[in-house]
Image: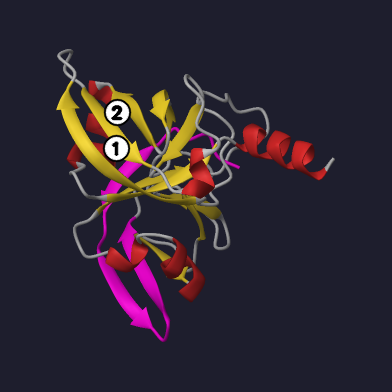
């Protein structure tokens, strides 16, 4: 489980094909930070996608990208230099500053516009797939490339996001562009409620 509060934004170091999958590597931003040491097998949210950390762990982090992961995410577009949002998994007793995030991508959205909000931030508009659209609620939660954000004025498949300067500076959304695909995860509580109602 994650919170959608990105702790580090790093650049892809390499992507190597492995059959129908790939091996992703990026810098290890947790080196020498005094936290619990990273462990092989640990779950890390990488731009909103829960991936398993491979060992040995040093100055670089490595992750296997399965064929299914490449099919369901924009990771097939990964290239050196592309920014990734990283978050370690939630520990019992940690503050839940964002919202409950599983790291299971519900679908890829597309950025359709980026506008200056006049307060140092940006107003970002995203088009969501049908797998996410039904869960878009005004002032509800959504995860965009691993960032916990608040839905603003959903209109069918499109919804807005207000990005403050701190979010732009600390995450990959600071370099977002129109036409870019983003990982979307709908609010977990909404999905459970919807499933329970539909099965009754």
Q: Is residue 26 left or right of residue 194?
A: left
Does residue 159 show up magenta in the picture? no
Q: Which residue is mark 1?
A: 171
Q: Is residue 96 left or right of residue 81?
A: right
- Gap between marks 1 and 2 measured at Cα: 6 Å
Q: Position of residue 8 (x, y in %)?
A: 34, 41
Out of 146 and 56, give the one closest to the viewer: 146
**Residue at image location 55% in from the left, 51% down from the top:** 104
Residues drawn in magenta: 1-27
Q: Is residue 40 left or right of residue 129?
A: right
**Residue at image location 57% in from the left, 24% down from the top:** 95
Q: Position of residue 185 (x, y in %)?
A: 50, 43
Q: Secondary structure at mark 2?
A: helix
Does residue 23 show up magenta in the picture? yes
Q: Is residue 9 visible?
A: yes
Q: Residues within 10 Å of mark 2 (few under 14, many from 20)?
A: some
Residue 100, picture quadrant: top right
**Residue at image location 47% in from the left, 34% down from the top:** 142
- Give the label on residue 167, or none: 2
Q: Position of residue 57 (x, y in %)?
A: 44, 62
Q: How is the image coloured?
A: secondary structure
Quick check: marks 1 and 2 in contact, CB under 8 Å?
Answer: yes
């Amino acid at each position: 489980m994650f919170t959608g509060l990105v702790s580090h934004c790093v650049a892809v170091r390499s992507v190597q094909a492995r059959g129908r999958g790939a091996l992703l590597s990026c810098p290890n931003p947790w080196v020498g930070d005094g936290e619990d040491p990273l462990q092989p097998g640990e779950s890390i949210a990488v731009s909103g996608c829960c991936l398993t950390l491979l060992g040995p762990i040093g100055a670089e982090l490595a992750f296997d990208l399965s064929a299914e992961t490449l099919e369901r995410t924009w990771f097939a577009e990964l290239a050196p230099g592309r920014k990734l949002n990283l978050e370690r998994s939630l520990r019992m007793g940690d503050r839940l500053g964002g919202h409950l995030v599983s790291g299971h991508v519900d679908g890829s959205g597309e950025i359709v516009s980026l506008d200056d909000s006049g307060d140092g931030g940006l107003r970002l508009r995203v088009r969501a797939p049908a797998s996410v659209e039904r869960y878009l609620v005004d002032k509800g939660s959504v995860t965009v490339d691993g960032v916990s954000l608040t839905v603003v004025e959903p209109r069918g498949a499109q919804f807005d996001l207000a990005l403050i300067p701190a979010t732009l500076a600390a995450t990959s959304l600071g370099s977002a562009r129109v036409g870019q695909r983003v990982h979307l995860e709908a609010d977990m509580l909404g999905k459970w409620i919807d499933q329970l109602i539909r099965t009754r």
